Amino acid sequence: MTPQEYCQQKTKESHSNFLTAFIFLKKEKREALTALYAFCREVDDIADECLDHEVASSKLNWWREEIERLFKGAPQHPVSKALHPFISLFELSKAHFDEIIDGMEMDVKLNRYESFKQLQLYCYRVASCVGILSAHIFGFKNKNTLKFAHNLGIALQLTNIIRDLGEDARRGRIYIPLDELAKLGISEEEIISLKNGEKIKALVKSQVERAKQFYGLAIESLPSEDKKSQKIGLVMGNIYYVLLNKIEKDDPEKILNQKTTLPWFRKLIISILTMLDFSWINKA
């Protein structure tokens, strides 16, 4: 199995909403993005599946060393080998790879977030940094496009947090800031036991509104000259924005006990319409 084949297999196993957008990329950029996404899956799986914190930290440290090797031209892992040709080609920054690993380290060490400021740092590391690296792969002329990638990453991660609220709670993780739970009179126990439908409804509403603000900021910060090159980011944004609207309309009990998804054909339609310049997202 070649490094690229390994990355393709890794991404297919994830069944991510992102994969629909990949089909619109030319071969070189598709391979680069597939390798980047495979890297994200590798380090995310450590944070999600490794229950021993010391072992998880040790594995993440190995990846820090591997990124060091990658940027010195001596990668060992199939994913790093697949990434290697694209580092200089697309001017990918080592700092952003390091930040992604730091975000996964937060997942290992933290299962609660005191405030949105703390949560936003996590979202930046695990999502915005991926978006910025992706923007480099897609190509851009105006540096303000990186603001688009930054804000879109926050929006996508907040959508994931809302979608996975029940699943994360059952695993002992609460990503909603604790100070915001306190304002709504929701205890950690109520989140974990998935009780209090009306309170949860108010909670979901507040989180959806924040996510929509970041989608709006993303669209607002995308320069017109880079709209074409960043179409794949817009595809991802529109798919997740439609998903967010579905979450908002669903009953809170359903959100907590059943993962909200979009059928593949709907994601494909959204993707095609986005490529034709249709958008579901309004500016902030």
Image (spheres, rainbow, N blue to C red):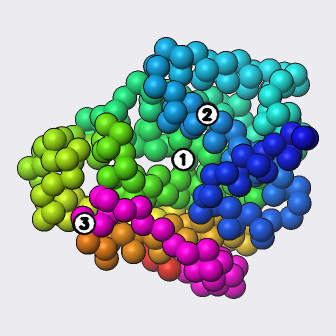
Q: Is residue 207 in sight in this rendering?
A: no
Residue 193, compared with residue 122, is above or below; it is below
Label 2 sits on residue: 43
Q: Main secondary structure of the magenta part?
A: helix
Quarter-of-image position of residue 139: bottom right
Q: Residues within 10 Å of mark 3 (few under 14, many from 20)?
A: many
Residue 164: image location, x then y, percent: 39, 53
Residue at x-position 50% and y-position 80%: 280
Mark 3 and mark 2: Cα distance apart in space = 31 Å
Mark 1 and mark 3: Cα distance apart in space = 25 Å
Return the disc, 1 or 3, that comes first in the chain's sequence.
1
Label 1 sits on residue: 127
Q: Observer-nearest residue: 281 or 221?
A: 281
| Mark in front: 1 vs 3 | 3
Give amino acid for label 2.
Answer: Val
Q: Residues within 10 Å of mark 1 (few under 14, many from 20)?
A: many
Task: Find the magenta span and give its range.
Answer: 252-279
Determine which of the numbered discs, if any, sits on residue 252 in the image: 3
Residue at x-position 31% and y-position 59%: 257
Mark 2 and mark 1: Cα distance apart in space = 13 Å
Residue at x-position 62% and y-position 29%: 98
Q: Could you say whether the residue bearing mark 2 is in a helix, strand or loop?
A: helix
